[in-house]
Amino acid sequence: MREVGVMREVGVVDYHTAGEPFRIAISGVPPIPGSTILERRAFAQTSAEVDAVRQLLVNEPRGHADMYGGFLVPPDDGGAHLGVLFWHKDGYSTACGHGTIALGCWAVENGVVAGDPDGDTEVVIDVPSGRVTARVTSRSGRVQAVAFRNVPSYVVATGVEVQTARGVVRADVSYGGALYVSVSAASVGLSVTAAHYPELIALGREVKWALNDSEWARHPSDSRLDGIYGTILFDDLGRNESGPHQRNVTVFADGEVDRSPCGSGTSARLALLAERGTVADGEILTHESIVGTFFQGRIVEPVTSDGRAAVVTEVSGSAYRTGTATFTLDPRDPLGTGFVLR
């Protein structure tokens, strides 16, 4: 908890993407200088004034332990419509697929980008991991779906042995804008269901921190993207007519749980499935979340990234506005910018 003297009012628009919240701060955020998104992220990480706003918006009583959102910032150059710094209860992430989907929806619904009322509109967004493009599909002036094309995704390592309280588990590491560890839930006697929710969180945290300082947690070209962002625990549900069907829960940051199937995590999973031949050209991964919502993911093309074989992926889903608010902090409030109770 951080004590502050006087806090400006902060205006937000809230969305959810497949059940995962995304809080867009649209006013009241202090200036965040920098010539690139990564420079702005570094500033926000060290600025008490900026981070106090993050805490105000994510902490209880205005948020909760699984809240997520972003600060709007200028893009790196004129090739993008906007930039964003993603944040959660523990800090600032490098990528966020569900947030990208929500931002595409918000930009078209609010006229930030002029949209085709009966067609597709591209919204180009600079995020810390690079430039992504959201394709927003509208019918009769209403947004129906958003598909985002991510930065290249690739496999880092497979079959990494991790000692846990449940014994040794075998994990795969892959990149989809952030570094993720994938573990089969069945391999540790679990399933991706609400009944196993506490155990999934505990294992996800344990695996993440076991590998966070390892050789597999280093980005090959930019140390600012280092670190294991989250653990993806998955169930293989076989195949349907369009391709593989899996259910997952992503435990990211320090025990935060993604209610959606995780957008950038879907890209990381597709890289692994492509290497193993589980998803073929033209097939679609049906990616289900722990709350029963869905993303669809596909491989657009093979590429080379940072000297590695990689794939460009596209992940599609839907976002819906849930409300607007103006948050304030009474300087007399002894809770300050709030607290997190997990």
Image (spheres, rainbow, N blue to C red):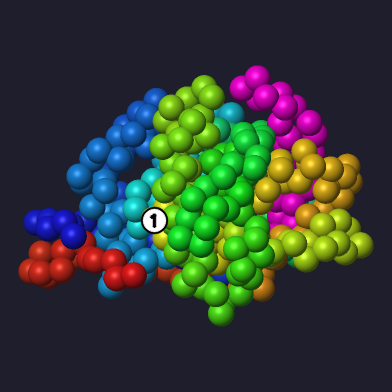
Residue furthest toward the bottom? 195
Total marks shown come to 1
- Quarter containing the N terminus: bottom left
The residue range painted magenta reads: 295-321
User: In terms of image quadrants, where is residue 11?
Assistant: bottom left
Decide which of 166, 14 is in the foreground and name it. 166
Residue at 53% of width from left, 41% of height from top? Answer: 178
Query: Which residue does the numbered mark 1 point to in the structure image?
Result: 254
Q: How far across and down, in percent of the image, does residue 124 sit?
A: 61, 39
Residue 309 sits above or below residue 52 on the image: above
Residue at 52% of width from left, 48% of height from top? Answer: 162
Decide which of 58, 184 is in the foreground and name it. 184
Residue furthest toward the front? 167
User: In terms of image quadrants, where is residue 341?
Assistant: bottom left
Q: What amino acid is labelled 1 in the image?
A: Asp
- Residue 287 visible, this orientation: yes
Is-magenta flag for residue 213?
A: no
Q: How far across and down, in percent of the image, does residue 299 sit?
A: 78, 42
Q: How far across and down, in percent of the image, does residue 26 sit?
A: 40, 54
- Residue 141 visible, this orientation: no
Q: How far across and down, in percent of the image, does residue 153 sit?
A: 66, 37
Decide which of 277, 286 is in the foreground and name it. 277
- Quarter containing the C terminus: bottom left
Tell me the element at label 1: loop
User: In terms of image quadrants, where is residue 45?
Assistant: top left
